[in-house]
Image (cartoon, rainbow, N blue to C red):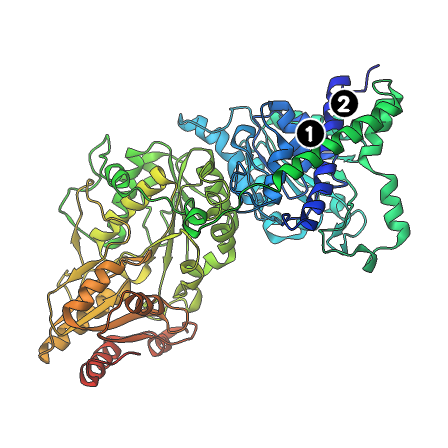
Amino acid sequence: MPVGGLGPRTALDLFDAQLESRHTDFAARWMQQQGRGYYTIGSSGHEGNAALALALRPTDPALLHYRSGAFYCARARQAGGVDAVRDMLLGVAAAADEPIAGGRHKVFGRHELAVVPQTSTIASHLPRAVGVAWSIARAKRLGTQCAWPADAVVCCTFGDASVNHSTAAGAINSACNTAFQGLPMPILFVCEDNGLGISVPTPHDWVRQAYGNRPSLAYFAADGCDPQAAFETAREAVTHVRKNRQPAFLHLSMVRFLGHAGSDAEAAYRTPSEVAADLERDPLLATARLLTSTGILTPQQVLDRYDEMSGRVLAAAKETLDSEPLTAAPQITAPIAPRRPDVVATTARRRATEPATAPVGEPVTVAQAINHTLADLLGIHPEMVVFGEDVGRKGGVYGVTRGLQRRFGSARVFDTLLDEQSILGLALGAGLSGLLPVPEIQYLAYLHNAADQLRGEAATLQFFSQGQYRNPLVVRIAGYGYQRGFGGHFHNDNAVGALRDIPGLVIASPSRPDDAAAMLRTCVAAAKTDGTVSAFLEPIALYHTRDLHEENDNAWLAPYPSPASHVPIGRARTYGTGKDLTLATFGNGVRISLQAARRLEQQGVSCRVLDLRWLSPLPTDDLLREARATGRVLVVDETRRTGGVSEGVVTGLTDAGFRGAVRRVTSVDSFVPLGKAAELVLVSVGDVERAAGDLLSAGPEAHR
């Protein structure tokens, strides 16, 4: 007999996927009791999302939240050749041969299934999903290869509590704004609403009221516990997105069984009647009723199928108990930041098909060097896109991207919303889809609004997919202080601690024009070849600086380097050959240290200045070499004394066995105030000169 839009075969596949997911949850609890199960956030009650999977194609990219077991099982059945139960149980056991994360976390993901792994997501994956949806049409427009079919629909699932997260609100707003402008945005937002955020109830009808009448966002709703309603509504929503290339919001009402996780005692916050009401809506019972009422299965066949699946999943769980865990730190960290410096160098030295935008050897400022290099790179890499607030027609607040949109078009150089989470999410989705994104964050202080897009999303993707997925990215960030007091803290932020502790993140910090050009080429090449994620910190105060020691000496200008120039990641640069003192520094500190070195030389002290250039990974070998050359190191750090770069530099010297004298001079542990008061908290030439004198007079054992 017909089963609505499902069809008998599809209905059976749906039921089997639901059974696989439910019994895998039971098996995970059993494995925990055996001491080999480490993850108990299950999907029980949410098995209606199997209908969503069957309404999509197995080539539609899916970014799923942590109650998506039945979706994963259903997609595996669609695609064939994947044992979803084994995948999930290996994840529960943290087994090294688990096929996506390799035991690093229990995630839903498989490259063959177009399921992009997410960890314990709240809403942080939504901006990336929007970026993936945007990239499908943009890649086609640019004539570059995309990871997804041209008519793909991006599926992004999350819970009802997550809709209140600022990241979700921003991502959905970004999708609506894009669609409102008439640009393609083929994304299906799926809210699996079980009415609870762990123990906190979602107000009745809140989700519909919040998202049921948004501009450019079609709204669909169904009972996710009813397989036929869920499938037919999901299919309608998917068809809308696929046909119109516009976003939709699918609201599925669901229930939650077994608590939030294994340690969650629901009796503390739910009444027996509430639990009983949910049990009446069990999606497995609803699908069983559908199968029996239409004659596809008899009641006994349903029970037999249930028991058979229970036995199969339990047997798989017993087999999984013997799986091997990860056994060594290098094995764990291998996917974080793969480095192929020779390949990166070759890529960085590629020449554009058009002549360089500035004659090689012409003196340029830092801003001009970055502008010319971006133009060169856009000429080399047709998949590269440059974007951010004000970078298009205006050419950036400081003119760094001036003229690029006019030359390369608005498809490749364009303005975005004023939302750093959306800017970085767009970049993550673009990189995942085959583009080469170079977004701009207007000021370093603004990055902190969106740091989790780098920490929790960008840096983790290769780690949790063993390199099967990656999001190459170079995020340009204007930052640091010394803008003569202009703008106060938000335009003179000197805090980089939030970046320095992100595993695998490359932090480039050029100070001179020629280095800015060569290091930017390196970062883009590393993104393209190794999937590297880089933060490219640009010192605002040096953008248009021309002089070093005296007015009109033009000593801060540098010849624009050949497009073939390249600075390897983690290599420093030394100025001078002084024998008395090494000044180790970066950013604005390079100019300050060179000025201080000149004063010290007039006092008979010969110095060398080491520009670290890379704050992560630190150039430890170069640092140690230059430290041993003088036996005395003064670290000049324009960031703060607590949590600043100097802590890592001093520790690096100590770990490497340096036994000479070390001190540091830093900015004060303070936010940067407005006006001339800024000079009172930022490190100065005089501070360096005095600290150098103290170090030189303290003897060879001075460490501080």
On the question of residue 204 being in view, the answer is yes
On the question of residue 219 being in view, the answer is no
Q: Which of the 4 quarters of the picture holds residue 214?
A: top right
Residue 347: mark: none
- In-front residue for pair 494/491: 494
Q: How much space separates mark 2 and mark 1, taking CA atoms?
A: 19 Å
At x 56% / y 32%, what residue is drawn? 61
At x 40% / y 25%, what residue is drawn? 143
- In-front residue for pair 682/530: 530
Residue 679 placed where, x, y %?
A: 33, 76
Give the residue pinned by disc 2. Answer: 11
Residue 678 placed where, x, y %?
A: 36, 74
Residue 603 placed where, x, y %?
A: 10, 80
Residue 237: mark: 1
Residue 71 lies, with reference to residue 669, above or below; the image says above
Q: Which of the 4 quarters of the picture holds residue 496?
A: bottom left
